[in-house]
Amino acid sequence: MEIQSCVKIINEWDIVAARQLGRNVAKELGFGVVDQARITTAISELARNIYLYAGQGQVCIEKIYDGAKAGLRIVASDSGPGISDIRQVMEDGYSTSGGLGAGLPGVKRLMDEFNIESSSGNGTKIITTKWIR
Amino acid sequence: MDFREMMESKYRDILEKYITEQSEQALYQGQKFSRKSIENKISPEELISLHKLSLTNMYPDLSKEVIDSFDILLEVMLGYGLAYREHQSLRHKQQELRTEMEIAANVQQTLLGTTIPTVDCLDIGAISVPAKHMNGDYYHFVKDEHNHISIAIADVIGKGIPAALCMSMIKYAMDSLPGSQHEPKLVLENINRVVEQNVDPSMFITMFFGMYNTSNHTFTYSSAGHEPGFYYHAAKDEFTEIEAKGLLLGVDKKTKYAQYEKAIEIDDMIILMSDGVTECRSDEGFIEKETLITYIKKYIHLSAQEIVNSLFKEIERLQHFELRDDFTLIILKRKV
């Protein structure tokens, strides 16, 4: 069973809507308070990247199940300029956050699984998952 | 027991103790707890959540406002936690780079390694210490079939890895010179062509090449803009600068070098160095040549190797044990 709901990211307020959606789903799934905060922070980062660098895009939240395991999946996609050097943006200390620990490496740390597809001119799609421990 | 499992009750104990006593001892336990939790990679947001949980368990009637306030604290501390973890990962990377650098330095030592030749008439001492991991100075000795000793000393302007990479090239240019090629000016002219072709114009290399003829005790030499060394005339107890003019390597491929010759008497010394020796800064500015000579005089009764070692120690101390440039010093002393 897969339930997916999405929030379009066009202005800064949509970041809050995406967080809210993520938090609701995380609560429903039974994530603890700390993990809820981690998931919403990851959503914030991804939505902010869309807002700042792509102009617009969307963030979708899915409940996923793998046997007895339940998890939450975030899919953030945009058709913005894309990322030409993915290795570089995944490197600690490179991101525009400038040593604040955020950016994509931060998202990867907050979540359990992380996958990115992007190329120059073709937009970016990031899929990241967190499982309930 | 796993720290994570017991941390809840442990934290609660400390908290309860502090709330009843407000003692320094409870605070000290808190400090110890933080060390343990850092060791066990507990993030700041987890601790906030633990604090909130402990409080709600200890005081079920605590006002909702106070409990809710921790949600903001947790959100804020999450950012700190991320920054902290990034810092950890960067520290780990730095450690890896350091290890890699140490390996590179070892490789370089093997590549550029030279042994000090032994001949009956000469006492030779040499020391070369890099300012960072890798050395941008280079020296090399060769003893030919007539027991004549050639000495090359070179210095790349700059230090660290770029300088070290450059030096490896000089070494191989030297190795590929024809075996009969010992005439200093021709050696420099050859190396100059290699450097001119292969090195970035922004990189400068100075070099000194000398040959000590062990049959007639003359020292023949040429210099490509290298820091002049000293000549010690034992009979007069007098130091003079070894005069040699010549353009830096790699500036013009057609450069011709002048060649000089000096007769060496018993107990005389030839002192060669890189600019790391003279450009070392003490509290009073650059050290003067006179200062250097004073130190050489202080140790003149020792063997050549002991003199260079002692000189290095003195200069290291002058710079408060912080080398600013690679340091190379060679002394040749005629024994008989």
Image: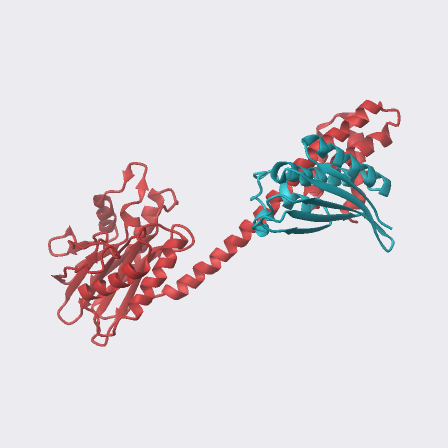
Chain colours: A cyan, B red
Locate residue A70 relative to residue B143 in the image: left or right: right
- Corner quadrant of residue B78: top right
Vertical order, B37 against B142 (above or below): above
Residue B216 percent location from the top left of the image: 12, 70
Q: Residue at x 32, y 47 (%)?
A: B314
Vertical order, B5 against B331 (above or below): above
Vertical order, B211 against B225 (above or below): below
Residue A85 percent location from the top left of the image: 56, 51
Q: Residue at x 71, y 46 (%)?
A: B40
Count of numbered circles in the view: 0
Q: Nearer the viewer, residue B160 or B36?
A: B160
Residue B225 percent location from the top left of the image: 22, 53
Q: Nearer the viewer, residue B166 or B332?
A: B166
Locate residue A30 relative to residue B225 in the image: left or right: right
Q: Quadrant of the C terminus of chain B?
A: bottom left
Q: Residue at x 37, y 51 (%)?
A: B159
- Corner quadrant of residue A61: top right
Residue A49 seen in render: yes
Locate residue B212 relative to residue B31 in the image: left or right: left
Locate residue B178 relative to residue B112 in the image: left or right: left
Vertical order, B222 against A15 (above or below): below
Residue B33 seen in render: no
Residue B213 percent location from the top left of the image: 17, 69
| Residue ranking furthest to the bottom | B145
